[in-house]
Amino acid sequence: MTGAPPTFSITEADPCSRITDSRCTTAAAPGRWISINFSTPGDGDLESEFTGVLVELFDAVVGTFRWSYE
């Protein structure tokens, strides 16, 4: 049994860091979710290429996540 792919949102609540929140449903329990969060100050510039790459790397790794029972 496999859950739905994660959904992503990027927030900028803290002006000094970039925060990414990913949520994924669990396979056997509708209404239950797992949340995976990531934040980074990057290189100090939230709009820099380096900071963007860190966020993209996190999204790529979490994008492969699926809830399953074996």
Image: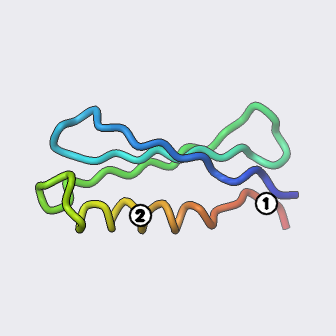
Q: Position of residue 67 (x, y in %)?
A: 73, 57
User: Decide: marks 1, 2 in contact (CB < 8 A)?
Assistant: no
| Observer-nearest of 48 and 62 | 48
Q: In front: mark 1 or mark 2?
A: 2
Image quarter of residue 30:
top right
Q: Amino acid at mark 1?
A: Ser
Q: In this figure, which residue is indicated by the disc labeled 2? A: 56
Q: In this figure, which residue is indicated by the disc labeled 1? A: 68
Identified at 11% across, 55% down, the residue is 44
Q: Amino acid at mark 2?
A: Glu
In the structure shown, which secondary structural element does the residue marked by tag 2 occupy?
A: helix
Quadrant including the C terminus: bottom right
Report whether 45 appears left or right of 38: left
Quadrant including the N terminus: bottom right
Report whether 69 appears left or right of 58: right
Identified at 85% across, 45% down, the residue is 28
Image quarter of residue 11:
top left
| Observer-nearest of 36 and 57 | 57
In the structure shown, which secondary structural element does the residue marked by tag 1 occupy?
A: loop
Crowdedness near tag 2: few (<14), some (14–19) or many (≥20) residues, C-alpha within 10 Å: few
Q: CA distance from mark 1 to mark 2?
A: 24 Å
Q: Position of residue 42 (x, y in %)?
A: 20, 60
